[in-house]
Image (cartoon, rainbow, N blue to C red):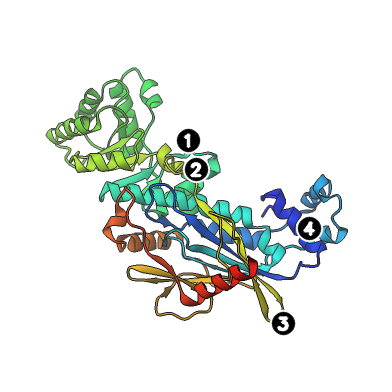
Amino acid sequence: MNGLLTDLYELTMAAGYYDAGKAQQKATFELTIRRLPAHRNYVVAAGLAQAIDYLLNLSFTAEEIDYLRGLPAFARASAGFFDYLRGFHFTGDVFAVPEGTPLFAGEPVMTVRAPIIEAQIPETYLLSALTFQTLIASKAARMVDAAAGRAVVEFGTRRAHTPEAGVLGGRAAYLGGCAGTSNTLAGFRYGVPVYGTAAHSWVLSFCGETEAFRKLQQTLGASTVQLVDTYNSIEGVKKVAALGRPLWGIRLDSGDFQALSREARGILDQAGLPDAKIMLSGDLDEYAIRDLVSSGAPVDAFGVGTQLATSADAPAMGAIYKLVELDVGCGIKRFTAKLSPDKATLPGAKQLFRFEGHDILARSGECSNGQAMLRPVLLGGKLVEPLPDLNAARTRAADLIAKLPAPLHSLEPAEPWPVRNSKDLTALIERTRSNLA
């Protein structure tokens, strides 16, 4: 895995740690959700599989090391540092919340304990990998909630910020509850069900809609989804109805969806096609989906692109990766925390315990009758056991989201889920801040 896929300061700090004699000093970092994205009552943890794959394969090639040598920032770095990078790999421990777990503000997603250079370099990648997929999975969960049992399909690769973001977005959307994705590579790589219809260019390439619809049926058979709004939606539906089966259904991509879906349903039913489905697409978000469902519009599926693939209303998440403790020798730990206003952090490695109705953030090693959420994933740089596959993570998400209190399912902000600090953690926070002040 490309060791340069990080911010420069991770590597300059690594050089500094090495030259300061700290290369083997054990450090503990935590990746924590500082605050929830706008309008979210919870997020769905996602991206762990990619984060762990990165750590298991992180290394530097000779060419990459030569590049670093030539940068002005490393002009004074010791030759030993570059020799160190030649054999670099991750040997530490990772504890993480399983994918598909609902989380709340102030809660840790991952704990990394390793020699300080090994723990520092991954910061950039881990934040990117975990926060992006968590954003998309969380957005998908909102849309699936709003759809109230109707299928939601992720259609957003063409609007994603990069093609690879489209692939990972398709994965995350499926984890968050979507029925599938239009991204074929996400289907191939991760086993996500793939869906596709046809574009307006298909219809425009023929002399008439009927011919276009007939030819598509000949190619796709029972999987045929006819896009009916190129010229006139209702006339398009009538032509589809006249052709009859084989047919999955129709897709409406513009217009008054409430009125058009009702009229289309009547035409299809009258033609003896009560099993033909109606899919809507075109600038949909969870609010539009909610309104269509609550109005009783006869819709079977929603295709959602831009709003989902970019988490458009909340495209960033306030997650942080901070040093919380250092081993200083002889079994002694030094606890670290930031005290800066609005960006203060909590000292010490932690465990998150979930109870019915609240969470407790505790010190690592504390005992509790709650469910421990951070679980060992890597020990000594090796996988403890294979990670759950994507379908298992998706099932976990569905089960745990369903158990959340009803107000947290609202698209509007609700009373926050209670997250409290344990007595031991509270005492450590007070002691550490007193020592640092």
Residue 356 picture quarter: bottom left
Residue plotted at (25% across, 25% down):
233
Residue plotted at (32% across, 54% down):
414
The residue indicated by pointer 3 is: 330
The residue indicated by pointer 4 is: 15
Tell me if mark 1 has few (under 14), some (14-19) or many (20+) residues whose alpha carbon lies within 10 angstroms of its own: few
Does residue 267 appear to the left or right of 376 in the view shown? Answer: left
Residue 228, percent across and down? 29, 28
Helix, strand or loop at disc 3?
loop
The residue indicated by pointer 2 is: 166
Does residue 280 appear to the left or right of 102 in the view shown? Answer: left
The answer for how far apart the CA atoms under marks 3 and 4 are is: 25 Å
Helix, strand or loop at disc 4?
helix
Label 1 near label 2: C-beta < 8 Å? Answer: yes
Does residue 310 appear to the left or right of 333 in the view shown? Answer: left
The answer for how far apart the CA atoms under marks 4 and 2 are is: 35 Å
Type of amino acid under label 1: Arg
Tell me if mark 3 has few (under 14), some (14-19) or many (20+) residues whose alpha carbon lies within 10 angstroms of its own: few
The residue indicated by pointer 1 is: 158
The answer for how far apart the CA atoms under marks 1 and 4 are is: 40 Å
